[in-house]
Image (cartoon, rainbow, N blue to C red):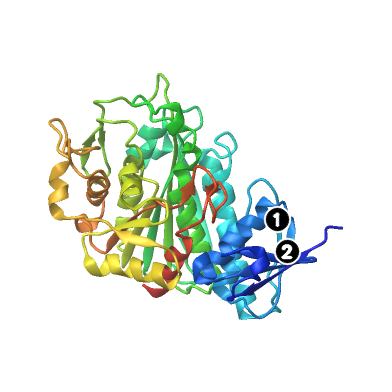
Amino acid sequence: MTKVMQVKLEQGAAAEAWGEKALLSFSGATATVHATEANGGVVVAAQRAARRLDGMGVPAVALAGDGWDLESRWAFWAGYYNPLRDNRLDWGLAAGKQLKELEAREAAARWVREITNGTPEDVSPRVLAESAATMLQKLAPDAVTYKIIAGDTLLQEGFAGIHTVGRGSVREPAMLQLDYNPTGNPDAPVDACLVGKGITFDSGGYSIKPSSNMATMKSDMGGAAMVSGGLALAIARGLDKRIKLYLCCAENLISGHAFKLGDIIRYKNGVTAEILNTDAEGRLVLADGLIAASEQEPRWILDAATLTGAAKMAVGRDFNSVMSFEDETAQRVLDAAAAEHEKAWRLPLERFHLEQIPSGFAEIANVGIDGSPGASTAAAFLARFVRDTGRNWVHIDLSGSYLPSANDQWAQGAKGHGLRTIARFLQDC
């Protein structure tokens, strides 16, 4: 039987013998985290200490003592998670509100991290859609209904973007349409719609990526995972509003059936888009989800996607990027992120960005003109598929959701950073 290491947290420095600024000290089977300002403060120190203990191969820990609070316990789990092994964590809490919240966070975040870290072979477009639907239906079996539209049926129902991007693969593209309706009234208004990019592998298509950039592209479905996980956490917290979820799932591969540069997609809302770069495919599938969401006339529309390298260049891998034409709408997401201790930063999106995606053969192109801001023009493309070109709509570019290699706070792979923001947005909107 594995012996469990007890882990305490103190805000004082370690004894001098452990070295200046020591993060951890040990006594028998007990480790103490020294959460000083020099070690990043309580939350950061807890997460860094968890990474250290994981790196030492400690397979099971129990949080002990009265130094822990809700956020430091959660930070420890976030750092202790390892996709290579099943580290076991005892929260050190009796049954109650805090334990219930932590278990809800863990269930949602673990699903997001595991489905995103799954191999492209295992996580096909349909598998992603089915996994999200199953996970959410188990949480609220009486309130969740869904359907999956796949293959050529997408064209029959007018979803040309998902079909175009996914037709190069032998594994058919799919759209999940899920309705969470706890009211029991089929005519209840839709409070919010969530739309997620679910590219389960992105080769770049004929605008092919270099191998080094392709290695992490199993994570290009992180948006679909994040909105699903956010909804899951909100449901576990008792969400009583009607929410509709749209996952836009496809593999972007090269074949004789794949879409090409110069192709034009005519969308269900009448907008035509010329393909100038097949590696700018996420916006092409999200367009279908945003059209479907807009048809519901919800109060709010939120989409999330690992959409642009430009956003990552702007804010790095610690922040997610937020864009909206409306200050109040963007601020709702920023406030939700702050309330949940997740990092988010607003990037510019103005009406003039709509003019920076011109095409000589269609209404818009799927990439901006030379010198235009890539994150902003990508969001501007999406806005063309939202009711009234962006009313009560916000876009999250998940710049901080995945790490190609481990660091001192996170294991390699998906972080789940953003799902709490989405959950709080749903609760507060």
Q: Residue at 52% x, 43% y: name it.
A: 405
Task: Say left or right for 32 vs 374.
Answer: right
**C-beta proximity under 8 Å, tags 1 and 2:** yes
Q: Nearer the viewer, mark 1 or mark 2?
A: 2
How many C-alpha atoms fall within 10 Å of the one at disc 2: few (<14), some, or many (≥20)? many
Q: Nearer the viewer, residue 11 or 372?
A: 11
Q: Compute the Cα span from label 1 to label 2.
A: 8 Å
Pinpoint residue 263: horizontal percent, then vertical percent: 26, 27
Q: Quadrant of residue 393?
A: bottom left
Mark 1: amino acid: Asn
- Residue at 57% of width from left, 60% of height from top? 48
At label 2, the amino acid type is Val
Q: Residue furthest top?
A: 256
Q: Choose between 420 and 292: the one closer to the eye.
A: 420
Secondary structure of residue under mark 1: loop
Q: Which residue is mark 1?
A: 87
Q: Residues within 10 Å of mark 1 (few under 14, many from 20)?
A: some
Residue named by callout 2: 61
Seen as rendered, the residue at the extreme right is: 1
Q: Is residue 103 above or below residue 274?
A: below
Residue 392 place in picture, x, y as percent = 26, 64
Residue drawn at the location 36% of the way across and 41% of the way down: 282
